[in-house]
Image (spheres, rainbow, N blue to C red):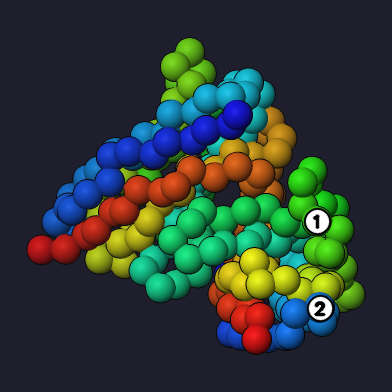
Amino acid sequence: EVQLLESGGGLVQPGGSLRLSCAASGFTFSSCAMSWVRQAPGKGLEWVSLISGSGGSTYYADSMKGRFTISRDNSKNTLSLQMNSLRAEDTAVYYCAKGVSSGWSDSFDYWGQGTLVTVSS
Amino acid sequence: QSALTQPPSASGSPGQSVTISCTGTSSDVGGYKYVSWYQQHPGKAPKLMIYEVSKRPSGVPERFSGSKSGNTASLTVSGLQAEDEADYYCSSYAGSNNLLFGGGTKLTVV
């Protein structure tokens, strides 16, 4: 059974940093691209970033470039998102999602339950 | 790039069919065969229902179907059931390794 378990969310002040993690199990982690997708309270989904199965390629939504860094440890089946210079508009539930292919993936067949990030003073 | 455009709400009675639209541009929906649809129940994670415009993942009922014409993609739910009541989101590849989501449609089974 595929499982994705996010952690690391919480309350952070504007300008601060936070690191999210996603522990994956139940599939061959290194064979799948992984992504972060966020959802602001009461709002729709927004793609954040994606990393290829090997970790050699990373992609970001324009509004996240330069502030967020996606990474993965295939030896530990773990996905991470380092978020810096956080803004109030980054407040959202952040989902870890499994891509359907190993390279760029435009759809995601399994999602975690999400971790809430709140940026506020 | 702007989010894809979906109607805020849609509704239908049990057993009826309902279609939800997702409108983009020639740079996203119209330019690629990479439209997906997700179902999200309140407080739950999204679930993939359709990928590559019209393909259904294993386990998704045949009542769910997808199509595309020009810059608009559509999700049709036939034989509506109470458990289909949820939010539905479309997504599309937008070129240059970018992915766009729609604003979401709340489907009510009345």
Residue at 40% x, 73% y is A42
Q: The residue under label 1 is which amino acid type? A: Pro
Check disc 1 and report its element: helix, strand or loop. loop
Indicate whether B25 appears above or below A14: below
Q: The residue under label 2 is which amino acid type? A: Gly
Judge whether residue A107 can be spotted in this image.
yes
Give the residue at mark 1. Answer: B61
Find residue B72 and report its horizontal and vertical position in percent.
80, 76
Tell me: A64 left or right of B89: left
Give the residue at mark 2. Answer: B15
Mark 2 closeness class: few <14, some 14–19, many ≥20 residues within 10 Å: few
Q: Chain of mark 2?
A: B
Find residue A21 and report its horizontal and vertical position in percent.
37, 34
Q: Chain of mark 1?
A: B
Residue at 58% x, 31% y is A2
Q: How many marks?
A: 2
Indicate whether A41 appears above or below A116: below
Label whose residue precedes the other's in the sequence (2 or 1): 2
Viewer-side residue, B63 vs B91: B63
Foreground label between 2 and 1: 2
Mark 1 closeness class: few <14, some 14–19, many ≥20 residues within 10 Å: few
Judge whether residue A82 can be spotted in this image.
no
> Which quarter of the rendered picture does the C terminus of chain B lie within?
bottom right
Find residue A80 and report its horizontal and vertical position in percent.
40, 34
Find residue B76 and report its horizontal and vertical position in percent.
81, 73
Viewer-side residue, B6 vs B105: B105
Give the Cα separation between the discs numbered 2 and 1.
Answer: 14 Å
Residue at 48% x, 43% y is A112
Indicate whether A4 appears above or below B4: above
Tell me: A14 left or right of A64: left
